[in-house]
Image (cartoon, helix red, strand yellow):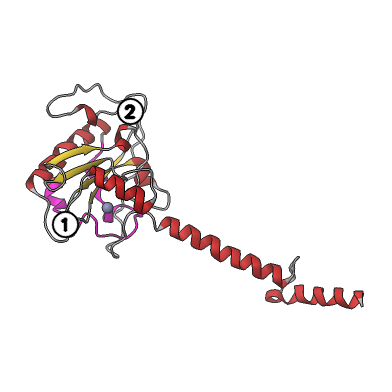
Amino acid sequence: MIHKCKMSIIRKKETVLGRKFPFSSEVFFIFACFSVFFFNGCQSTRDNYPVIVHPSSPGQQLPPEISSDWKPPEVESSSDVPWGWIPPKSVEKNWTAIIVHHSATETGNMAKFHKSHIEEHGWDGVGYDFVIGNGTDSGDGEIEVTYRWRDQKTGAHCWTPDNWANTDGIGICLVGNFNNRKPTKRQMDSLVKLTDFLQKRYRIPQSRITGHGETRDAHATDCPGRLFPMSSFKSMLNF
Ligand SMILES: [Zn+2]
């Protein structure tokens, strides 16, 4: 009787996908269920990253990032360079790219995005480094510096498989939905001024300034919006 039972188990092991497994089909089934649960879990975590709108063009191929013996230049604060833009030396990183976003909302400011990114995505705070207002919840063209820039933390604004855009890229968000309207002139003036400072400080060439949706390997999105004037923005840059 015992012998018969053992034979039955062995046959069952042998029938799983026609191969010999060191465990029974029940164990195999439980393992398969766990695998499905586990990978779905990864997927939902990944979906917590910034909004995917719809597929767009394949990612722009950026040149390799610049590795150098870069040291932060001595820059004095001035009317053109507020103190908040200059990170503490003890934590300052050598950023190598700038990623431009729109908020895809008509209104907003740093505090509102900070709250929504915590509550809706479970992040530790607002995902961007800078937020440029449109006159709704902050001034038109007002540049707000987030804690993420102040502490030089990795961003949460542009997901790629190796996370390079969040690790090495500076995230600037302009408030507004630029699928419906263009950014204001003051927003663009502020964006140019801020980008000019960042380019010079970190020696970031124009080829490494990109809209979210054009970023190499980024999730498909039309951010910073179809009406964002990328080419005229780049034509206004000096570096
Ligand atoms: Zn974006």
The kind of residue on which mark 2 rests is Trp
Residue occupying image coordinates x 55% and y 66%? 36
Q: Name the quarter where the C terminus is drawn.
A: top left
Q: Earlier in the sequence, mark 2 or mark 1?
A: 2
Q: Is residue 105 visible?
A: yes
Give the magenta-colored segment's residue range: 204-233
Q: Which residue is mark 2?
A: 70
Q: Name the quarter where the N terminus is drawn.
A: bottom right
The kind of residue on which mark 1 rests is Phe
Q: Tag on residue 178?
A: 1
C-alpha distance separating marks 2 and 1: 35 Å
Question: Callout 2 environment at 10 Å: few (<14), some (14 to 19), or many (20+)?
Answer: few
Disc 1, SS: loop
Residue occupying image coordinates x 30% and y 47%? 115
Location of residue 200 in the rendering, given as x and y in whole percent from the top left corner: 21, 32
Q: Tag on residue 108?
A: none
Q: Residue furthest left?
A: 185
